[in-house]
């Protein structure tokens, strides 16, 4: 079982705002990174650190954290944002990494 | 530009071993750890292990202990993942991913900024 918990599926109306959450005890002292994966493609980094976006990632993607919960927020979701999203962190042992189970985002 | 180019798809029988390669270019190979991640059909991402460019330290996920071997070849800027005693549930796409770390507010974080395109390993008799 994963040490990071994500909701399996979330939906959002086109142009609206949606948050995808990730919970885990290890998140109290580290930051997660977030990855977007579309069918048949490799994952792509979208958020890392406190709230940093790699070059080429739209500014509608943002990250935040509080206590043991991290959130990825998409402000003004677009059709192309429909994908699976995974959080990742170092686990509580400090020696391994772990992914959340993933959240399938549907844009209606 | 940074690129991680993986070797081609493999088909293996149960009990065999598979070795997947990941050739890096566009950056200093000796400066970044390399991770391996796999994804079974219709499933999520699963972290397998990580290795320092020098070959040590390395860390493997508990479920792969004894079956997984990660190596690095700095002369060719290539990382290798070998998984032995293959079973049907090892059928998956295997990815290599470059590690980057940083610190903010006294909190260290790690992320995978570049990924290979993946190598499909099919285990079937």
Image (cartoon, coloured by chain):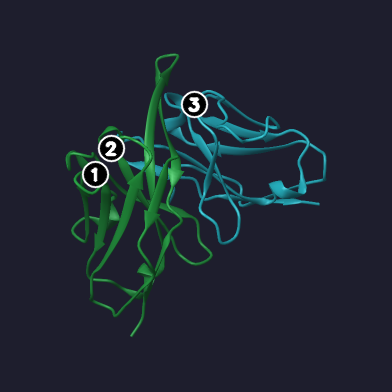
Q: State the residue position of label 3.
A: A49
Horizontal placement of A60 versus A7: left or right? right
Residue appearing at x 20%, y 44% in the figure:
B74
Kindly identify which chain the residue marked by label 1 belongs to: B
Tell me the SS state at disc 3: loop
From the viewer's side, name the closer residue of A29 and A79.
Answer: A79
The quadrant in which the C terminus of chain B is found is bottom left
Q: Secondary structure at mark 1?
A: strand
Counting labels gives 3
User: At x 24% / y 61%, what residue is drawn?
Assistant: B82
Label pair 2/1, CB-CB below 8 angstroms? yes
Instruction: Indicate the position of residue B22 as horizontal and vertical percent values.
Output: 33, 54
- Is the C-beta separation of discs 2 and 3 under 8 Å? no
Q: Report which quarter residue A99 is drawn in.
A: top left
Determine the CA span between mark 2 and mark 3: 19 Å
For residue A75, above or below residue A39:
above
Cα–Cα gap, marks 3 and 1: 22 Å
Where, by quadrant of the figure, is residue B19 drawn? bottom left
- Label 2 chain ID: A
* Image-based side of A22 in relation to B69, left or right: right
Badge number at residue A95: 2
Mark 2 vs mark 3: in front: 3
Q: CA distance from mark 2 to mark 1?
A: 7 Å
* Left or right of residue B92, residue B29 in this image: left
**What residue sits right under mark 1 in the picture?**
B59
**Image spot of residue A43 (x, y percent):** 52, 49
């Amino acid at each position: 079982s994963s040490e990071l918990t994500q909701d399996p599926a979330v939906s959002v109306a086109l142009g609206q705002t949606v948050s995808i959450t990730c919970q885990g005890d290890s998140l109290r002292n580290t930051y997660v990174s977030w990855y977007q994966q579309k069918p048949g493609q490799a994952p792509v980094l979208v958020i890392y650190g406190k709230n940093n976006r790699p070059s080429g990632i739209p500014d509608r993607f943002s990250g935040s954290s509080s206590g043991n919960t991290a959130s990825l927020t998409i402000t003004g979701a677009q059709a192309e944002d429909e994908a699976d999203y995974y959080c990742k962190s170092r686990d509580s042992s400090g020696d391994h990494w772990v992914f959340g189970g993933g959240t399938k985002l549907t844009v209606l | 530009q940074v690129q991680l180019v993986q070797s081609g798809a493999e088909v293996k029988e149960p009990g065999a071993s598979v070795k997947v390669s990941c050739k890096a270019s566009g950056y200093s190979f000796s400066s970044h750890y390399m991770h391996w991640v796999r994804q079974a059909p219709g499933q999520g991402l699963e972290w397998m292990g990580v290795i320092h460019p020098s070959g040590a330290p390395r860390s493997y996920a508990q479920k792969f202990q004894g079956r997984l071997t990660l190596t690095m070849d700095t002369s060719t800027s290539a990382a290798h993942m070998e998984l032995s005693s293959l079973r049907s549930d090892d059928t998956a796409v295997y990815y290599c991913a470059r590690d980057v770390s940083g610190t903010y507010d006294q909190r260290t974080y790690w992320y995978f900024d570049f990924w290979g395109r993946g190598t499909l390993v099919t285990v079937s008799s």
